[in-house]
Image (cartoon, rainbow, N blue to C red):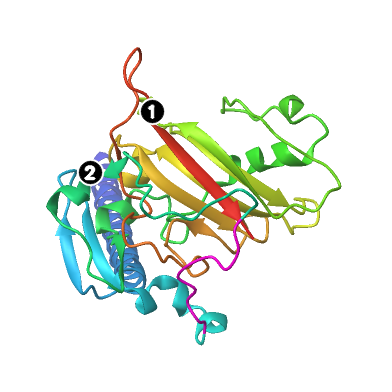
Amino acid sequence: MAETTRAFLVALLIALAFLFSEGDARAAAESGWRSAQHRREVQSLLKRINKPPVASIRSPDGDIIDCVHISKQPAFDHPLLKNHIIQMRPSKQPSGQVYDESNIASITQAWHQNGECPEDTIPIRRTKEEDVMRASSVRMYGKKMPDWRRISKLVSTDNPLNDVTTGHEYGVAYGTGDNEYFGTKMTINVWQPTPQSGDFSLAQLWISAGSYANQDLNTIEVGWQVYPAMYGDGSTRLFIYWTRDAYNRTGCYNLGCSGFVQTDTRFAIGGSLSPVSTYGGTQYELDILVWK
């Protein structure tokens, strides 16, 4: 009986070992398939958003700036923009606003140290594989996370400061009313804060209309941000964001999707800004104008 029991236990252990081994192999194969599939998705995204450059400039901060022909930028992947006529200068200006290219700001970008983009091209920060791999998924790369989207409700409440958003701290100045608005302007100080791990910091102009309730919230956002999870470093970077359906299917950071047409050849959206303000030292400001 004892020999029979031992033989049964040995057979059972062998069967279990085979079962676990087969399960581990199946899990490893599935993980490998998912990894290969994920990498294919990453490469497909990179091929779509990184357009063939006329020239490329390696920035001292590690970025690669691609000088892409203005007509080949990601915006023109959208079917509705296929025959778009690029307007290089605004046809109208706000009252009192003068369009003067000679008024060059003292704030520059690091890549300027190593060159400039040729005429008829725009500078685009090249998206690297590691940038996409840091995102929660390929689909979510360059998009706001769901919990971050709730901050947008600040602008739709009677008192935005009463709309507590868990996990975020913010200071807000806002304006509401029944008047028809065509744009706004703001000046923000440029700093380089050091966010804790997993955090980010920004200062921005945020224009919105519509609502979350109707899923028609549309926003235009522009400013600077320090966002290590997005860019892989702690640099202060120029950014834009937009959405027209409450951050559901449309919108993205910078030039990561179709929608925003860039004409300026000097600044790379998503590129680092320098110099930045220092406590008790020189202050640097960024003037932002959004105008329809």
Q: Quadrant of the N terminus?
A: top left
On the picture, is 202 further left or further right than 54? right
Q: Residues within 10 Å of mark 2 (few under 14, many from 20)?
A: few
On the picture, is 187 further left or further right than 6? right
SS type, badge 2: helix
Q: Position of residue 212 (x, y in %)?
A: 75, 50
Q: Which mark is residue 3?
A: 2
Q: Position of residue 181 (x, y in %)?
A: 74, 52
SS type, badge 1: loop
> Which of 198 and 8 lies nearest the eye of the viewer?
198
Residue placed at 20% from the left, 50% from the top? 111
Residue placed at 19% from the left, 43% from the top? 61
The residue at the far right in this view is: 178
Q: Could you tell me what secondary structure mostly forms the magenta stretch?
A: loop
Q: Would you say residue 88 sits in the magenta stretch?
A: yes
Residue placed at 58% from the left, 63% from the top? 250
The residue at the far bottom in this view is: 83
Q: Which residue is mark 1?
A: 191
Disc 2 marks a residue whose amino acid type is Glu
Q: Would you say residue 31 sits in the magenta stretch?
A: no
Please, is residue 222 above or below residue 284 in the view? below
Among numbered discs 1 and 2, the one appearing first in the sequence: 2
Residue placed at 74% from the left, 57% from the top? 215
Disc 1 marks a residue whose amino acid type is Trp
Residue 110 placement: quadrant:
top left
Q: Which residues make up the magenta segment?
A: 84-93
Total of numbered circles in the picture?
2
Q: Position of residue 127 (x, y in %)?
A: 30, 59
